[in-house]
Amino acid sequence: MGRSVYTGIYEPGHPTATPDGFRQDVLDLVRELNPSLIRYPGGNFVSGFRWEDSVGPKRPTRLDLAWHSVETNEVGLHEFADWAEKAGVEIMQAVNLGTRGIADAAALLEYSNHPAGTAFSDQRQANGRTEPFGIRVWCLGNEMDGPWQIGHKTAEEYGRLAAETARVMKWVDPTIELVVAGSSNAEMPTFGSWERTVLEHTLELVDHISLHAYYEEKPGDLGSFLASGVGLDRFIGDVAQIIDEVTVAAGVDRFIGISVDEWNVWYQTRFNEIDKDPLFSGEWNTHPRLIEDEYNVSDAVVVGSLLISLLRNSDRVTMANLAQLVNVIAPIRSEPNGPAWRQTTFFPFALTAGAARGEVLAATIHSDSYETVQHGTVDLVDAAVTATDEEIVLFLVNRSSSEPLTLEVDLAGAPAASVLSAESLFAPEGGDRFATNAVDHQDTVHPRPLTDVTLTDDGAAATVVLPALSWSIVRLAAKAAA
């Protein structure tokens, strides 16, 4: 999609390009971002994708109807898998259930994961990959409830197809995990009934059901935007309740996880009202510039709050994928033959991915509140806490756009020995919440030391002063058990 691959992660001839054409500067930033699982090849793109086009020496050029683009297939499964190994990430592979179906999904799985001795596994070896890719997680299509989706279906149509595809794929490789497509967003008119119908067909065959969630600041409603995490909490909670009701009704004792495999801040209103028509009515181009949103301080705080929501719901959320990685509504930006840099949203993701380990502790919040148009009454403070035997990590958001807040943290259940580090992302000098990082000012917004953090002598309480409109991370050394 857009420049996520071409001039994103891949650009032969770039000053940092490796011999296989991938950008080393972008790869270094991906490693710093610290994702663990990357969904490939999409997205709406997958519903018109012929996987055979992306392997072997001869790659046909195709029209990508999802994004009105020309796809050269220069980067395909083998190239992406090599890049993923360098980046230290697993592939989450999506199969096309829009224009294709059971046989093609099974063939791609056999090509990818079967050791040798069959037509498709031998084809993989002939194309240069002796050992299987060993792809563990597979998505059964994408957003099949959406009329924008190529080959979109009713819940009954999709549920039947997903079930039969899942059954055959698990015959090919019983070790894989499967993600069935839930609703594209919580505002879909079929939300709820879609999940019930799809799960009734697939309950004993799949391991996760997806939800997709995007948020944007609407004019004059910063308060609702900053409370986007509340909306995500409710969306996850609603899906979890439906899973429980369907499993109980079916008499099936089986855990189905929630895969939030698309989530982010995305200014969809602007795209749909301004950018979309010129793109879809114009010429067919390779890797056009597409939804390259430039993120500000407020966007980064919301991304941090959405990460807190995902942590808070980790008893039900089994995986989550920020959409997307480079250039397209992404934490990393790059310019052709030019630099790569971190957007404001890069920092909460990278720091959370690097620090959130062990158990998520229950965090009860007592805070002043405010009224929002979309979410009702909302706390000014949002928080999540993770803990290992060695470390306690506080993830904190101050939703007040004007005032710092002093937070008293009760650590009696997990006392701390010392403050290891404390950082906060907030507006730079002058308090401009619309500040961004861009090609000509790449370091305007970045985390800064959070100096007002103190512990009591016994480590049972901490005080943290949170800057106005901020996302913060405080890492504490855990006190050794007596």
Image (spheres, helix red, strand yellow):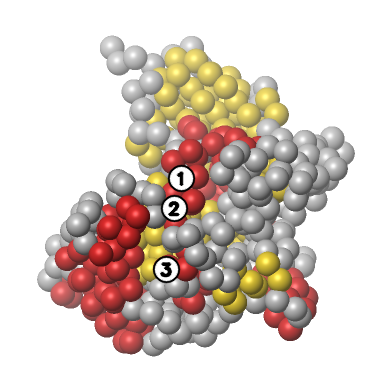
Residue beneath the point at 70% across and 80% down? 280
Cα gap from disc 1 to disc 2, whole angstroms:
6 Å
Q: Which mark is residue 52?
A: 3
| SS at badge 1 | helix
**Mark 3: amino acid:** Glu
Cα gap from disc 3 to disc 1, whole angstroms:
17 Å
**Mark 1: amino acid:** Asp
**Placement of 48 over or under 481, stated as above or below:** below
Looking at the image, do the residues carrying marks 3 and 1 touch, with CB atoms under 8 Å apart? no
Q: Is residue 53 left or right of residue 259?
A: right
Q: Which corner quadrant of the image does residue 269 belong to?
A: bottom right
Residue beneath the point at 38% across and 16% down? 479
* Location of mark 1 (residue): 82
Does any portion of residue 64 appear in the rendered image? yes
Q: Is residue 89 left or right of residue 162?
A: right
**Placement of 219 over or under 357, stated as above or below:** below
* Location of mark 2 (residue): 78
Q: Quadrant of the N terminus?
A: bottom right
Looking at the image, do the residues carrying marks 1 and 2 touch, with CB atoms under 8 Å apart? yes
172 or 382: nearer the eye? 172
